[in-house]
Image: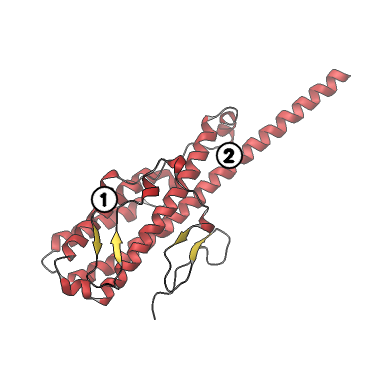
Amino acid sequence: MTWVIILLLIIVALAVAAVVMYNGLVKQRNTVQEAWHQIDVELTRRHDLIPNLVETVKGYAQHEAKTLDDVIRARGAAVNTHGSPDHAADAAAAEGELTQALGRLISVSEAYPDLKANQNYQQLMGELSATEDRIASARRYYNACVRDLNSKVDSIPTKFMAGPAGVTKAEYYEADEATKGAPQVNMTNAEAPSVQFDAPQSQQRPYNEQPQLPPSQMPYPTQGGQSNTFQAPGQQGYGVEYPEQRK
């Protein structure tokens, strides 16, 4: 009778462990998907800014048609690739091409002082710079979540529950190394914002050495003394809370 009780206890313990591992894998997969949504929100914001930027530049730099067309084309490719963490690598590659095209556009803009002095151009540059910073923060958090998920899928005993749970390894969203050398631009106006496409130092470190924050705690540049953060899923205004930039 004692052996029967012991056997039943072992079976119950194994069943509980299996449920815990199953739920842990599913929870981590959902965390990865939520982290991807934060990237997706910021990429959409970036894509929405570009048409206005192109139109503004076009008004002052009509002879730069090829550079403008390259940006439009790269934006179209980027829009078509993002949307799912299953294609994170493709999205990162397309966004890298877009970053390089934007870098060339900004370099060209340096030759047009009237353009750099344009208030609309300065505002767009400020919004684009803030968006780039938020993308970098969201990317670091997403990659940390992916690393945790992939570790669970590869580790024993959780790897044996990955199949039944329908959980597979996720793709990292890794910035193209070529984009780290993109030009940084400072406006001649001391009050105008600067735009930098170089990766922050923390972004260039290995994933396990990068500071990781959940979306609800990730800060991004402030304006007018306001502090703004990502909003976690389920909060009011799901997505990102943007500062009031227009007066």
Q: Which of 195 and 145 is in front in this view?
A: 195
Dot 1 or dot 2, earlier in sequence: 2
Residue 240 seen in render: no
Residue drawn at point x = 62 percent, y = 37 percent: 22
Q: How far across and down, in percent of the image, does residue 211 sit?
A: 47, 48
- Display coloring: secondary structure
Q: In the image, is 50 to the left or to the right of 22?
A: left
Q: Which mark is residue 149?
A: none
Q: Is mark 1 on a helix, strand or loop?
A: helix
From the image, tell me which residue sits under label 2.
Answer: 25
Circle 2: residue type: Leu
Q: How crowded is mark 2: few (under 14 residues within 10 Å), some or many (20 or more)?
A: many
Report the quarter where the C terminus lies: bottom left
* CA neighbours of label 1 inside 10 A, class few (<14), some (14 to 19), many (20+): many
Q: Which amino acid does label 1 sit on?
A: Glu
Q: Going by the picture, which residue comes out furthest to the left?
A: 63
Q: Where is residue 236 in the image (x, y as percent from the top left)?
A: 56, 66
Instruction: Tell me which residue sits at (25%, 49%) in the image.
Output: 181
> Residue tagged by mark 1?
97
Residue 176 in picture, x, y percent from top left: 30, 45
Identified at 10% across, 66% down, the residue is: 63
- Give the alpha-carbon distance from disc 1 to disc 2, as whole Å: 34 Å
Residue 203 in the figure: left or right of residue 107? right
